[in-house]
Image: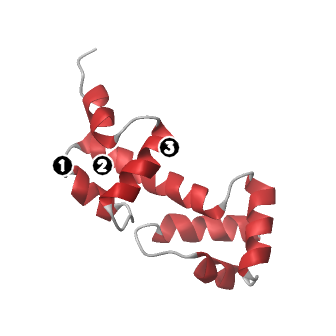
Amino acid sequence: MGSKKKAHLYMIDNFQENINLEKVSAIIGMTPTSFCRYFKKHTSKSFHTVLNEIRIGHACKLLIENKMNISGICFDSGFSNISNFSEQFKKIKGISPSQYVKNRHKPS
């Protein structure tokens, strides 16, 4: 299995945990600097961007299910604080988590 795929699978399996660059690069067998360069070259995105996209994808699923509040979704998606969650959500989706919920539950 290639290093990019191995890193991506690790992120998918562990996105709810505190994943850091040092941990993932060690699993791949690279230094953090080499891993960053390699990952960016092969995905055109940074490690943290991809990790946040995975986390926000999970958050969107939970928001659609409407079984948890936004704060619970934030922590269940691997974010350590609501401010960062909201910032990353808006950066990736272009709207706030609460606006996402409103848009998804509007009658067509």
Q: Is residue 29 above or below residue 49?
A: below
Q: CA distance from mark 2 to mark 1?
A: 7 Å
Foreground mark, 2 or 3, reads 3
Q: Residue at image x 45%, y 57%?
A: 55
The CA distance from mark 2 to mark 3 is 18 Å
Work out whether 60 lies above or below 94.
Answer: below
Residue most extreme to the top = 108
- Residue 8: quadrant of the picture: bottom right
User: Cβ–Cβ below 8 Å for labels 2 and 1?
Assistant: yes
Q: Can you see residue 57?
A: no
The circle drawn on residue 80 is none
Q: Mark 1: which amino acid?
A: Lys
Q: Which residue is mark 1?
A: 67
Residue kind at label 2, given as amino acid type = Leu
Query: Would you name the residue on which mark 3 appears?
Result: 91
Provide the residue designation for mark 2. 62
